[in-house]
Amino acid sequence: MRSENMLICPLCKAPLAAEGRSFYCKGEKRHCYDVASSGYVNLLPPGKKSNAKTGDDREMLRSRRSFLSGGHYDRISEAAAREALSVLGHRNSITFADAGCGDGYHALNIEKYYKGLGIDCAAVGLEASKHGAEAASKLAKKENSAAFFVAANIFDMPLCDKSCDIVFSMFAPVPDAEALRVLRDDGVLLVCSSGSYHLWEMREVIYTSPRVSEPLSRVPEGFCLASKASLKYSFSLDSNEAIEALFTMTPFYYRCPKEGRERLLSLDSLTVTAETEYKVYIKADNKDI
Ligand SMILES: C[S@@+](CC[C@H](N)C(=O)[O-])C[C@H]1O[C@@H](n2cnc3c(N)ncnc32)[C@H](O)[C@@H]1O
């Protein structure tokens, strides 16, 4: 299935069909959604107040892009792709959704990883920020990828029932019920989150007594844990700009004390630990299959 063929109307839930540079729903009202010049489609239901505020703004996306383009997190996307596949089992084609995909970095890396294994891939990225979906589409075009990006709410995904083999949640909120709906019976949900010591050296600079964070322990409703893995490595940032770009895309950016921020932003280099956890869930109904 091509990723565009998985889409449904966010208003009446009827399938969407592409006609020229628009998508029309097959419902009575034929709701129409235009594809933006960058290639993404906005399927955020019109008029919802949250649309304007949810998601990263352009400044945060710029920082994210600037940091991620350094390749420091490539291993994180590859580990996510690998762990999900190890539970799903090898197949010739995979359809996946990246829920809360930001600027599409992980979705495109994951697609590349599967293609490298000879797996035919249909990828769709869902992101609340229109700027994010736009940036992701531009990146996909640049990388000659067929991945499709949609501005959408992951808690009300504009995707057909049972259309995905994998739903990825990379450092994003986990939409339990919607992941359960859009996954095939044998599909898997991969949740990637920060480990206890993720970016520890950055925390040591910002805070006088940094705290070890609690890893996520909640099992998404309707799922059961099939596998668990972690990844730990360090990488070096060799400019003040690179340090600032990473800092701006972390939650510390919003809540760290002024002196800590100043200390960090006066540095010209920093070696940091990346620590991530990967949990792969299968549908609880399917655990005995
Ligand atoms: C920490 S960022 C991670 C982005 C990306 N997965 C990455 O790792 O680079 C979390 C992302 O989830 C998105 N997000 C949060 N709530 C969302 C929602 N209800 N629907 C769609 N996206 C959402 C945010 O806009 C943001 O881009």
Image (cartoon, rainbow, N blue to C red):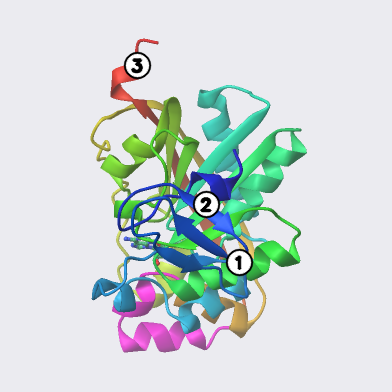
The residue under label 3 is 287
To which quarter of the image does residue 44 belong?
bottom left
CB of mark 1 within 8 Å of CB of mark 2?
no
Q: Residue at x 35, y 54 (%)?
A: 154
Report the label total. Answer: 3
Res. 17 mark: 2
Of residue 255 and residue 100, the one placed in the foreground of this image is 100
Q: Find the distance from the CA under tag 3 to the CA under tag 2.
A: 35 Å
Region in magenta: 249-267
Q: Residue at x 26, y 75 (%)?
A: 47
Q: Earlier in the sequence, mark 3 or mark 1?
A: 1
Question: How would you rate the neighbour count of disc 3 (Cα within 10 Å): few for under 14, some for 14-19, many for 20 or more?
Answer: few
Give the percent coordinates (x, y) of residue 198: 44, 56
Q: Quadrant of ligand 1?
A: bottom left
Give the percent coordinates (x, y) of residue 252: 36, 73
Q: Find the distance from the CA under tag 3 to the CA under tag 1.
A: 42 Å
For badge 1, the amino acid type reads Arg
The answer to whether the residue bearing label 1 lies less than 8 angstroms from the nearest atom of ligand 1 is: no
Q: Is residue 263 above or below residue 187?
A: below
Q: Residue at x 44, y 43 (%)?
A: 277
Question: How would you rate the neighbour count of disc 2 (Cα within 10 Å): few for under 14, some for 14-19, many for 20 or more?
Answer: some
Give the percent coordinates (x, y) of residue 241: 60, 84
Helix, strand or loop under label 1: loop
Give the percent coordinates (x, y) of residue 200: 44, 61
Specify the quadrant that holds the N terminus. Answer: top right
